[in-house]
Image (cartoon, grey):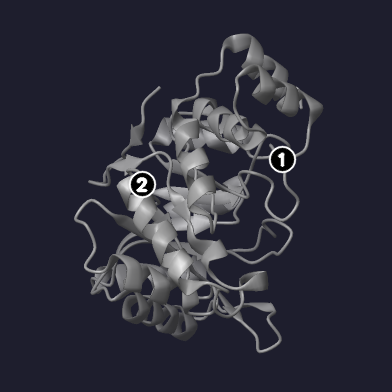
Amino acid sequence: MSKHYTPRNTDLHLNRIGYGAMQLAGPHVWGPPKDRAAAVAVLRAAMELGVNHIDTSDFYGPHVTNQIIREALHPYRDDLTIVTKIGFRRGDDQSWLPAASAEELRSAVHDNLRNLGLDVLDVVNYRAPGLEGADGSSIAEPLSAMLRLKEEGLIRHIGLSNVNAEQVAEAQRITDIVCVQNHYNLAHRKDDALIDTLAAQGIAYVPFFPLGGFSPLQSDVLTQTAAALHATPMQVALAWLLQRSPNMLVIPGTSSVAHLRENVAAGALELDAATVQALNAI
């Protein structure tokens, strides 16, 4: 099993276990963390463990996670890819609000650039509408706005988040897509066909909530498998994702260095065919 992935038509050499920065913000992804020094330590430990792919957004906090990433890691290593997302903003009541006009997308790109301390963003995902999954609406207008930002040199690569297969195809008629980030894990497998399609096209698939998100995965089969492998259930869930498809990149988030080490160690866990079959049945 390859430990790296390079999306087609890019020079991105991504270690398949990345880090999701959402948990660096305070409760409900709002405000500063309780322990900012601990958040900085997690990011620096991730680099030491070989992580070279961080997923973030300036609407986490808002602004908080990007500012912590800059504090911890700037100036950035040459091999570090920071992937951000735009298309939403946070309301004063902590709500998540669509923000997909050309003006809002441009403002969001500049917010990310400023708070990360960058002149150009490696990858920007358009986070399509729908709080319970893709709503299937046209994304042509925001993608066209992002293409203009790419042509101006503010974005290197464009990705998508919270989309279905039809929306991916629509986006590809406008510009190249390097990655798709959707809700997917052992117990939520609606995207199985899309993952295979993207793999054939050389496009990375990045599952968010790889460990269940706000409701962690729970399964007797998962627990029993982990015990037999002397691993944690979450390590097995990550290993299953990595073996699911070669274009799969995982971005588990944590505010704990110990948990971070467990997540990265999942990359060394090999599941045999019988184990994979049992897990597939969950």
Camera-side residue: 276 or 67? 67
User: Where is residue 93 shown, x and y percent of the image?
Assistant: 71, 86
Instruction: Identify the residue at horizontal 50%, vertical 71% (top origin).
Output: 141
Mark 2 lies on a secondary structure that is loop
Tell whether label 1 touches label 2 (CB within 8 Å).
no
Please name which of the two marks, 2 or 1, marks the residue nearer to the observer.
2
Q: In the shown orientation, is residue 157 left or right of residue 233?
A: left
Q: In this rendering, is residue 96 above or below 247?
A: below
Which residue appears at 57% of the width and 38% of the height?
194
The quarter in which the C terminus is drawn is top right
* Amino acid bearing label 2: Val
Q: Along the horizontal axis of the image, is 181 left or right of 16?
A: right
**What numbered label is drawn on residue 51?**
2
- The vertical placement of 172 against 150, above or below, is above
> Where on the picture, by quarter, is residue 92?
bottom right
Q: Label 2: how many residues lie within 10 Å, few (<14), some (14-19) or many (20+)?
A: many
Q: Mark 1: which amino acid?
A: His
**Residue 244 placement (x, y as % from top left):** 55, 27
Quadrant housing the N terminus: top left
Using the rendered image of the protein, determine whether residue 169 is visible from the camera's viewpoint. Answer: no
Residue drawn at 60 percent across, 56 percent down = 162
Q: Is residue 126 visible?
A: yes
Q: Is residue 147 left or right of residue 266?
A: left
Which residue is most to the left?
78
The residue carrying mark 1 is 188
Q: Quadrant of residue 78?
A: bottom left
